[in-house]
Amino acid sequence: MKRKVSLMVFVFFYLSCIAIMDYPYLARIYNGRVQGKAVTEYEETIEKMDRNMWQEQLERAERYNCFLGSGTEERLEDPFGNTSQNHREYEELLNVGKEGIMGWIEIPQIQVTLPIYHGTSENALQKGAGHLEGSSLPVGGTDTHTVISAHRGLPSKKMFTDLDQLETGELFYIHVFQKILAYQITEIETVRPDETGPLAIRKGEDLATLVTCTPYGMNTHRMYVHGKRVPFEKITGESTGTIEMERWIREYGWLCLSIVLIVWLLILIIRFCGKKEDAVRARKRRRRKVKKCGKQNQSGKK
Protein backbone atom coordinates (compact mmCIF):
# COMPACT_ATOMS: atom_id res chain seq x y z
CA MET A 1 0.00 0.00 0.00
CA LYS A 2 2.79 2.42 0.87
CA ARG A 3 4.58 1.69 -2.39
CA LYS A 4 1.36 2.39 -4.31
CA VAL A 5 0.86 5.76 -2.58
CA SER A 6 4.51 6.67 -3.18
CA LEU A 7 4.12 5.83 -6.87
CA MET A 8 1.01 7.98 -7.18
CA VAL A 9 2.74 10.93 -5.52
CA PHE A 10 5.77 10.50 -7.78
CA VAL A 11 3.60 10.37 -10.91
CA PHE A 12 1.65 13.47 -9.83
CA PHE A 13 4.73 15.60 -9.25
CA TYR A 14 6.47 14.24 -12.35
CA LEU A 15 3.56 15.15 -14.61
CA SER A 16 3.10 18.50 -12.84
CA CYS A 17 6.72 19.43 -13.55
CA ILE A 18 6.36 18.51 -17.22
CA ALA A 19 3.11 20.51 -17.47
CA ILE A 20 4.70 23.59 -15.88
CA MET A 21 7.69 23.42 -18.22
CA ASP A 22 5.49 22.79 -21.26
CA TYR A 23 3.05 25.64 -20.61
CA PRO A 24 5.16 28.46 -22.15
CA TYR A 25 5.81 26.38 -25.28
CA LEU A 26 2.16 25.37 -25.67
CA ALA A 27 0.98 28.92 -24.99
CA ARG A 28 3.42 30.35 -27.56
CA ILE A 29 2.32 27.81 -30.15
CA TYR A 30 -1.34 28.62 -29.46
CA ASN A 31 -0.83 32.39 -29.63
CA GLY A 32 1.30 31.95 -32.74
CA ARG A 33 -1.64 30.17 -34.36
CA VAL A 34 -4.00 32.98 -33.29
CA GLN A 35 -1.69 35.63 -34.76
CA GLY A 36 -1.24 33.56 -37.90
CA LYS A 37 -5.02 33.30 -38.24
CA ALA A 38 -5.31 37.10 -37.99
CA VAL A 39 -2.76 37.43 -40.81
CA THR A 40 -4.60 34.86 -42.93
CA GLU A 41 -7.93 36.62 -42.43
CA TYR A 42 -6.30 39.91 -43.40
CA GLU A 43 -4.95 38.40 -46.63
CA GLU A 44 -8.33 36.85 -47.42
CA THR A 45 -10.04 40.22 -46.89
CA ILE A 46 -7.56 41.89 -49.25
CA GLU A 47 -8.22 39.28 -51.95
CA LYS A 48 -11.97 39.90 -51.76
CA MET A 49 -11.60 43.68 -52.01
CA ASP A 50 -11.90 45.57 -55.26
CA ARG A 51 -8.47 46.64 -56.48
CA ASN A 52 -9.59 50.25 -56.85
CA MET A 53 -10.73 50.27 -53.23
CA TRP A 54 -7.41 49.20 -51.72
CA GLN A 55 -5.53 51.40 -54.20
CA GLU A 56 -7.50 54.33 -52.78
CA GLN A 57 -6.48 53.23 -49.27
CA LEU A 58 -2.83 53.24 -50.29
CA GLU A 59 -3.13 56.71 -51.82
CA ARG A 60 -4.70 58.06 -48.61
CA ALA A 61 -1.85 56.54 -46.60
CA GLU A 62 0.71 58.10 -48.95
CA ARG A 63 -0.91 61.52 -48.56
CA TYR A 64 -0.75 61.08 -44.79
CA ASN A 65 2.96 60.25 -45.06
CA CYS A 66 3.55 63.31 -47.25
CA PHE A 67 2.00 65.43 -44.53
CA LEU A 68 4.36 63.89 -41.95
CA GLY A 69 7.33 64.29 -44.30
CA SER A 70 6.61 68.00 -44.72
CA GLY A 71 8.03 68.60 -41.25
CA THR A 72 4.74 69.36 -39.53
CA GLU A 73 4.62 66.16 -37.46
CA GLU A 74 4.69 66.21 -33.69
CA ARG A 75 7.58 64.78 -31.69
CA LEU A 76 7.37 61.00 -31.44
CA GLU A 77 6.78 59.42 -28.05
CA ASP A 78 8.07 56.20 -26.52
CA PRO A 79 6.04 53.33 -28.08
CA PHE A 80 5.63 51.71 -24.65
CA GLY A 81 4.60 54.91 -22.89
CA ASN A 82 0.85 54.42 -23.57
CA THR A 83 0.66 57.89 -25.11
CA SER A 84 -1.28 57.00 -28.25
CA GLN A 85 -4.26 59.34 -28.73
CA ASN A 86 -6.17 56.93 -31.01
CA HIS A 87 -7.25 59.66 -33.45
CA ARG A 88 -10.22 58.58 -35.54
CA GLU A 89 -8.65 59.75 -38.83
CA TYR A 90 -5.51 57.74 -38.13
CA GLU A 91 -7.49 54.64 -37.17
CA GLU A 92 -9.39 54.67 -40.45
CA LEU A 93 -6.23 54.62 -42.57
CA LEU A 94 -5.33 51.12 -43.87
CA ASN A 95 -8.00 49.65 -41.59
CA VAL A 96 -9.19 47.02 -44.04
CA GLY A 97 -11.11 44.55 -41.91
CA LYS A 98 -12.11 47.10 -39.26
CA GLU A 99 -10.09 45.04 -36.76
CA GLY A 100 -7.31 47.61 -36.50
CA ILE A 101 -4.87 45.57 -38.61
CA MET A 102 -2.96 47.62 -41.20
CA GLY A 103 -0.66 44.82 -42.42
CA TRP A 104 1.76 42.28 -41.04
CA ILE A 105 5.47 41.94 -40.41
CA GLU A 106 7.66 38.97 -41.25
CA ILE A 107 11.14 38.41 -39.81
CA PRO A 108 12.38 35.10 -41.28
CA GLN A 109 15.64 34.87 -39.30
CA ILE A 110 13.81 34.66 -35.95
CA GLN A 111 10.63 33.03 -37.32
CA VAL A 112 8.30 35.93 -36.50
CA THR A 113 4.99 36.65 -38.22
CA LEU A 114 2.84 39.28 -36.51
CA PRO A 115 -0.18 41.36 -37.49
CA ILE A 116 0.44 45.11 -37.21
CA TYR A 117 -2.24 47.04 -35.32
CA HIS A 118 -2.94 50.75 -35.19
CA GLY A 119 -1.26 52.43 -32.24
CA THR A 120 0.81 51.09 -29.38
CA SER A 121 -1.84 50.71 -26.70
CA GLU A 122 -1.52 47.70 -24.42
CA ASN A 123 -4.55 46.16 -26.11
CA ALA A 124 -2.80 46.31 -29.49
CA LEU A 125 0.56 45.08 -28.15
CA GLN A 126 -1.07 42.07 -26.47
CA LYS A 127 -2.41 40.91 -29.84
CA GLY A 128 0.62 41.55 -32.03
CA ALA A 129 2.87 44.37 -33.17
CA GLY A 130 1.83 48.01 -32.98
CA HIS A 131 2.45 50.90 -35.35
CA LEU A 132 3.69 54.01 -33.56
CA GLU A 133 1.20 56.77 -34.24
CA GLY A 134 3.01 59.82 -35.56
CA SER A 135 5.45 57.74 -37.60
CA SER A 136 4.95 57.05 -41.31
CA LEU A 137 2.39 54.46 -42.28
CA PRO A 138 4.06 51.26 -43.61
CA VAL A 139 3.49 51.79 -47.32
CA GLY A 140 7.02 52.87 -48.24
CA GLY A 141 8.13 55.91 -50.19
CA THR A 142 10.69 58.69 -50.01
CA ASP A 143 10.78 60.71 -46.78
CA THR A 144 9.13 57.96 -44.71
CA HIS A 145 10.10 56.25 -41.48
CA THR A 146 7.67 53.72 -40.09
CA VAL A 147 8.09 52.44 -36.52
CA ILE A 148 6.81 48.99 -35.49
CA SER A 149 6.95 47.92 -31.85
CA ALA A 150 6.14 44.74 -29.94
CA HIS A 151 6.65 43.28 -26.49
CA ARG A 152 9.55 41.10 -25.47
CA GLY A 153 9.82 38.42 -22.81
CA LEU A 154 6.13 37.53 -22.45
CA PRO A 155 5.96 33.94 -21.15
CA SER A 156 3.04 32.97 -23.38
CA LYS A 157 3.90 34.97 -26.53
CA LYS A 158 7.04 35.18 -28.59
CA MET A 159 6.51 38.62 -30.19
CA PHE A 160 9.91 40.42 -30.45
CA THR A 161 11.62 38.29 -27.78
CA ASP A 162 14.43 37.22 -30.15
CA LEU A 163 14.94 40.61 -31.75
CA ASP A 164 18.43 40.79 -30.23
CA GLN A 165 19.47 37.83 -32.39
CA LEU A 166 19.20 39.87 -35.58
CA GLU A 167 22.32 41.20 -37.27
CA THR A 168 23.05 44.00 -39.71
CA GLY A 169 22.55 42.96 -43.31
CA GLU A 170 19.59 40.69 -42.56
CA LEU A 171 16.11 41.44 -43.89
CA PHE A 172 12.61 41.87 -42.55
CA TYR A 173 9.42 42.37 -44.56
CA ILE A 174 6.28 44.44 -44.14
CA HIS A 175 3.18 43.24 -46.00
CA VAL A 176 0.49 45.85 -46.71
CA PHE A 177 -2.33 45.00 -49.12
CA GLN A 178 -0.49 43.21 -51.94
CA LYS A 179 2.76 45.10 -51.44
CA ILE A 180 5.81 43.50 -49.85
CA LEU A 181 8.32 46.01 -48.52
CA ALA A 182 11.81 44.64 -47.84
CA TYR A 183 14.08 46.37 -45.34
CA GLN A 184 17.74 45.54 -44.74
CA ILE A 185 19.03 46.07 -41.21
CA THR A 186 21.61 48.86 -41.14
CA GLU A 187 22.02 49.48 -37.43
CA ILE A 188 20.99 48.11 -34.03
CA GLU A 189 21.19 50.42 -31.04
CA THR A 190 20.10 50.60 -27.41
CA VAL A 191 18.74 53.89 -26.10
CA ARG A 192 16.79 55.36 -23.19
CA PRO A 193 12.98 55.45 -23.53
CA ASP A 194 12.98 59.22 -24.07
CA GLU A 195 15.55 59.07 -26.89
CA THR A 196 13.21 59.05 -29.89
CA GLY A 197 15.38 61.16 -32.18
CA PRO A 198 16.58 58.11 -34.19
CA LEU A 199 12.93 57.44 -35.10
CA ALA A 200 12.54 60.71 -36.98
CA ILE A 201 12.06 60.94 -40.75
CA ARG A 202 15.25 61.44 -42.77
CA LYS A 203 14.91 63.37 -45.98
CA GLY A 204 15.25 61.27 -49.10
CA GLU A 205 15.17 57.92 -47.28
CA ASP A 206 12.68 55.07 -46.91
CA LEU A 207 13.20 53.61 -43.43
CA ALA A 208 11.58 51.24 -40.94
CA THR A 209 12.55 50.65 -37.32
CA LEU A 210 11.58 47.75 -35.06
CA VAL A 211 11.34 48.65 -31.37
CA THR A 212 11.21 46.54 -28.23
CA CYS A 213 12.26 46.72 -24.58
CA THR A 214 15.70 45.75 -23.30
CA PRO A 215 17.52 44.32 -21.33
CA TYR A 216 15.49 41.14 -21.24
CA GLY A 217 13.30 41.06 -18.15
CA MET A 218 14.33 44.55 -16.96
CA ASN A 219 12.99 46.73 -19.79
CA THR A 220 14.76 49.91 -18.71
CA HIS A 221 15.89 50.80 -22.24
CA ARG A 222 14.73 50.39 -25.82
CA MET A 223 16.27 48.43 -28.67
CA TYR A 224 16.03 50.02 -32.11
CA VAL A 225 16.55 47.81 -35.15
CA HIS A 226 16.85 50.19 -38.09
CA GLY A 227 16.19 49.03 -41.63
CA LYS A 228 16.57 50.70 -45.03
CA ARG A 229 14.29 49.83 -47.95
CA VAL A 230 15.79 47.55 -50.58
CA PRO A 231 14.28 45.82 -53.64
CA PHE A 232 12.21 42.80 -52.68
CA GLU A 233 13.57 39.40 -53.68
CA LYS A 234 11.75 36.21 -52.90
CA ILE A 235 13.41 33.97 -50.30
CA THR A 236 15.04 30.93 -51.92
CA GLY A 237 13.69 27.44 -51.27
CA GLU A 238 16.90 26.36 -49.53
CA SER A 239 16.78 29.30 -47.12
CA THR A 240 13.09 28.73 -46.48
CA GLY A 241 13.70 25.06 -45.67
CA THR A 242 16.46 25.89 -43.21
CA ILE A 243 14.32 28.49 -41.46
CA GLU A 244 11.36 26.12 -41.24
CA MET A 245 13.58 23.39 -39.77
CA GLU A 246 14.93 25.78 -37.14
CA ARG A 247 11.40 26.89 -36.37
CA TRP A 248 10.23 23.28 -35.97
CA ILE A 249 13.09 22.49 -33.58
CA ARG A 250 12.49 25.62 -31.53
CA GLU A 251 8.74 25.15 -31.26
CA TYR A 252 8.39 21.38 -31.03
CA GLY A 253 11.75 20.12 -29.75
CA TRP A 254 10.82 20.41 -26.08
CA LEU A 255 7.38 18.89 -26.71
CA CYS A 256 9.03 15.86 -28.31
CA LEU A 257 11.29 15.54 -25.28
CA SER A 258 8.23 15.79 -23.03
CA ILE A 259 6.57 12.94 -24.91
CA VAL A 260 9.72 10.83 -24.47
CA LEU A 261 9.70 11.57 -20.73
CA ILE A 262 6.02 10.63 -20.44
CA VAL A 263 6.59 7.39 -22.35
CA TRP A 264 9.53 6.62 -20.05
CA LEU A 265 7.23 7.19 -17.07
CA LEU A 266 4.61 4.84 -18.52
CA ILE A 267 7.27 2.17 -19.02
CA LEU A 268 8.34 2.52 -15.37
CA ILE A 269 4.72 2.22 -14.22
CA ILE A 270 4.12 -0.83 -16.39
CA ARG A 271 7.32 -2.46 -15.12
CA PHE A 272 6.39 -1.60 -11.54
CA CYS A 273 2.90 -3.04 -11.97
CA GLY A 274 4.36 -6.09 -13.70
CA LYS A 275 6.78 -6.70 -10.84
CA LYS A 276 3.96 -6.28 -8.35
CA GLU A 277 1.84 -8.83 -10.20
CA ASP A 278 4.81 -11.21 -10.33
CA ALA A 279 5.27 -10.78 -6.58
CA VAL A 280 1.55 -11.49 -5.98
CA ARG A 281 1.69 -14.61 -8.15
CA ALA A 282 4.85 -15.74 -6.35
CA ARG A 283 3.16 -15.32 -2.97
CA LYS A 284 0.16 -17.30 -4.20
CA ARG A 285 2.45 -20.07 -5.42
CA ARG A 286 4.23 -20.19 -2.05
CA ARG A 287 0.90 -20.34 -0.24
CA ARG A 288 -0.26 -23.19 -2.45
CA LYS A 289 2.99 -25.05 -1.79
CA VAL A 290 2.64 -24.49 1.94
CA LYS A 291 -0.93 -25.76 1.89
CA LYS A 292 0.11 -28.75 -0.23
CA CYS A 293 2.97 -29.60 2.11
CA GLY A 294 0.63 -29.20 5.09
CA LYS A 295 -1.84 -31.62 3.59
CA GLN A 296 0.92 -34.13 2.81
CA ASN A 297 2.21 -33.92 6.38
CA GLN A 298 -1.27 -34.52 7.76
CA SER A 299 -1.69 -37.51 5.46
CA GLY A 300 1.69 -38.97 6.58
CA LYS A 301 0.73 -38.67 10.23
CA LYS A 302 -2.44 -40.57 9.62
Image: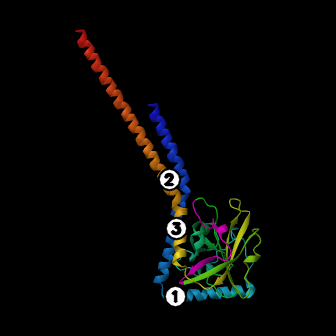
Give the x, y percent position of residue 31.
53, 64
Q: Residue at x 50, y 89 (%)?
A: 51
**Circle 2 sits on which residue?**
258
Residue at the extreme bottom = 52
Q: Residue at x 64, y 61 (%)?
A: 153
Q: Amino acid at mark 2?
A: Ser
- Give yes or no for contact between labels 1 and 3 (Cβ–Cβ under 8 Å): no
First reached walking from the N terminus: tag 2 or tag 3: 3
Q: Amino acid at mark 3?
A: Met
Give the x, y percent position of residue 30.
51, 62
Instruction: Look at the image and say whether residue 69 sits in the magenta stretch.
Output: no
| Residue 72 image-quadrant placement | bottom right
| Residue 212 image-quadrant placement | bottom right
Element type where label 2 sits in the image: helix
| Left/right of residue 184 with respect to residue 156 in the rendered view | right
First reached walking from the N terminus: tag 2 or tag 1: 1
Quadrant including the C terminus: top left
**Circle 1 sits on which residue?**
53
Q: Amino acid at mark 1?
A: Met
